[in-house]
Image (cartoon, grey):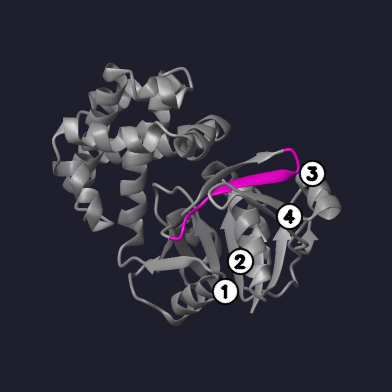
Amino acid sequence: MRVLIYGAGAIGSFYAAQLFTAGYDVTILARGKRLEDIKKHGVVIDHFFQKQQTVTNVPVIERLENNDVYDFIFVIMQKNQTYEILPNLKENRFCNNIVFFGNNGKGGEEYIESLGKERVILGFPSIGGKREGHKIIVAYSENSSITIGELDGIVSRRLVDIATMFDRAGLIVKTSDDIDSWLKYHIALVSPLANGIHMAKKNNFELIHNKEAMLLMIKAIKEGFKVLKKLKFPIRPKRMRTLHYYPNFVIIRILKRTIGTEVGKLVLREHAITAKEEMRKIADEFQELIKESGMITPSINELVEYIK
């Protein structure tokens, strides 16, 4: 199995190292300083929970050539950055399995227009982290799970192949029968959380003690769920129903346990800050859904102002 990881940030680097260590023919695509760092140091990862560091000499390239052959290409980068690489992916006709891992409020339509429906798979990674010099710090646990899905909801042979590949690398994969809805509900959750971080002056520990901000985030999350429900998107994953139906004080307790920790700082705060352009992008994508629904979303709109 020949694999290209297109994107050498925290998540892409981690997956490349894990798959390479599991024995797969993996290459990672990086540019600029990150390319230099991998060539010089390898993929250096500090595993947050496991309290260990690994160094993996994953082969690295700077560009995907038109005649390069891969069984799978995993695109792992911020949503606003994916548009820049679509021409490169389109020019290469030797890989029919391109997996876009990450935030996505518009489904597969933009990717299909460029690449064709048969080449596109959507998914979401299960970890968080950040770059620190030439190192990557990554937070994941044995319960972390990757979610993938075909646009038509079937469990195809290639989804099984992806699950087998990551399972061999020690990572759990779950398939979704409606990956588009899954990704939209994820944005309905993560966008208010990220914007709430900015409301609390980019401090996740300050956020959990800001009652106004916590309540505003929960109202925004519930508004987003109502928008998606009106547009006939079923709740995915089903456990997200708790955020729709639980009373606010219960959700506050749940979120405090997630946000107000060092893991919350690494996974949520760091991404909210370093990926601010992406947070704007997915907020704009959700605004299109709000407009389509015809609903009024004052809490979402108030939070959005903190990232403009």
First to last magenta residue range? 133-142
Q: Is residue 284 above or below residue 175?
A: above
- Lower position in the chain sequence, tag 4 or tag 1: 4
Q: Residue at x 66, y 41 (%)?
A: 131
Residue that mark 2 sits on: 73
Q: How many marks?
A: 4
- Label 2 packing within 10 angstroms: few (<14), some (14-19), many (20+): many
Residue 127 point in image, percent of width and height: 50, 51
Q: Could you say whether the residue bearing mark 2 is in a helix, strand or loop?
A: strand
Whichever of callouts 2 and 3 sits on the residue coming sooner in the sequence is 3
Q: Which residue is mark 4?
A: 43
Of labels 1 and 3, earlier in sequence is: 3
Does residue 184 appear in this view?
yes
Q: Disc 2 and disc 3: Cα gap in Å?
A: 20 Å
Query: Which one is in front in this view, the residue at disc 4 or the one at disc 2?
Result: 4
| Picture coordinates of residue 277, whole percent (x, y) | 54, 33
